[in-house]
Image (spheres, grey):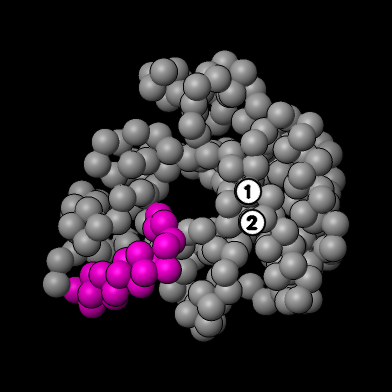
């Protein structure tokens, strides 16, 4: 039976979890990334990667992405009501097909206004390896978002053929280093040398860096040694429901 993402969302089977992102030195909570999980009654929990491609192929990704953005922002507003002094940033992934919609930047502005969010509270993450159907409109959307104060991150950096080429554009605020460079990271490896070069380049361009997929103390120590200050991964904190994130915010307040 083909997967029906739209029906799963309407049935309440697709829910959001939030991957925490920490300051690697102080372990303070800096941001959360909204991640969709499909609680399939037949096959169990499906992570985003297992169905997002299907939503892109059948044209449901724009509607799905809109739902994810609105749901994540509504939850962020709930946390902000409880913890008004939090500096937490919400990260939401956007499909190239979403960004290729001329109305996307306006939709984001509307959602932010509905939840009394400042544009800098939100970071839109764009995967490096995706190829938009309309690159010109996508670029216009990203520039409009950046001009409004929304932050823009280039996700999964290091996995696509056009990574360095994309850095020529001026709408990025942040690079998220793909977990493939981080999982087995240790001093003296080629991955470490490459990441040192990426950190130097990012600093020259005025970009922040977040390391994804931190799972070992060795990798954490090496990231700190080469100057990466922010990260996420199971060593620091697994994706969690809104209640668990709320508890982390309560501890920090």
Determine which residue is flagged by label 2. Answer: 146
Q: Image quadrant for the N terminus?
A: bottom right
Q: Point out residue 92 in the picture as x, y percentages from the top left corner.
A: 62, 48
Packing grade of label 1 (10 A; few <14, some 14-19, many >=20) is some
Q: Point out residue 86 in the picture as x, y percentages from the top left corner.
A: 49, 26
**187 part of magenta stretch:** no
Horizontal arrangement in the rendering, residue 204 relative to residue 71 (left or right): left
Which residue appears at 62% of the width and 31% of the height? 76
Tell how many labels. Answer: 2
Q: Secondary structure at mark 2?
A: helix
The answer to whether residue 248 of the structure is visible from this angle is yes
The residue closer to the viewer here, 96 or 54, is 96
Secondary structure character of the magenta stretch overall? helix
Q: Point out residue 52 in the picture as x, y percentages from the top left corner.
A: 68, 59
Q: Is residue 232 above or below residue 55?
A: above
Report the residue that reaches farthest toward the front.
Answer: 147
Horizontal arrangement in the rendering, residue 77 relative to residue 60 (left or right): left
Q: Secondary structure at mark 1?
A: loop
Marks 1 and 2 in Cβ contact (< 8 Å) = yes
**194 part of magenta stretch:** yes
The image's mark for residue 149 is 1
Q: Is residue 28 above or below residue 195?
A: above
Q: CA distance from mark 1 to mark 2?
A: 5 Å
- Which residues fall within the magenta stretch? 189-210
Q: Image quadrant for the C terminus?
A: top left
């Amino acid at each position: 039976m083909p997967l029906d993402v739209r029906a799963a969302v309407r049935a309440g089977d697709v829910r959001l979890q939030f991957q925490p992102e920490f300051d690697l030195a102080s372990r303070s909570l800096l941001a959360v990334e909204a991640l969709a999980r499909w609680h399939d009654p037949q096959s169990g929990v499906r992570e985003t990667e297992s169905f997002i491609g299907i939503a892109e192929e059948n044209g449901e990704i724009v509607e799905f992405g809109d739902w994810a953005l609105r749901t994540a922002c509504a939850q962020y507003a709930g946390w902000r009501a409880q913890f008004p002094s939090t500096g937490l940033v919400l990260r939401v992934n956007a499909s190239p097909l979403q960004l290729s919609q001329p109305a996307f930047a306006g939709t984001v502005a509307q959602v932010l206004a509905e939840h009394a969010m400042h544009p800098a509270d939100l970071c839109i993450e764009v995967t490096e390896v995706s190829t938009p159907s309309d690159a010109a409109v996508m670029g216009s959307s990203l520039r409009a978002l950046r001009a409004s104060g929304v932050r823009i991150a280039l996700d999964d950096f290091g996995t696509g053929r056009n990574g360095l080429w994309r850095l020529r554009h001026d709408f990025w605020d942040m690079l998220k280093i793909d977990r493939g460079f981080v999982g087995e990271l240790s001093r003296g490896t080629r991955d470490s040398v490459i990441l040192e070069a990426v950190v130097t380049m990012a600093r020259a361009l005025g970009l922040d860096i977040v390391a994804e997929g931190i799972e070992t103390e060795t990798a954490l120590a090496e990231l700190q040694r080469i100057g990466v200050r922010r990260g996420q991964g199971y060593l620091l904190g697994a994706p969690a429901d809104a209640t668990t994130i709320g508890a982390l915010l309560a501890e920090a307040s």
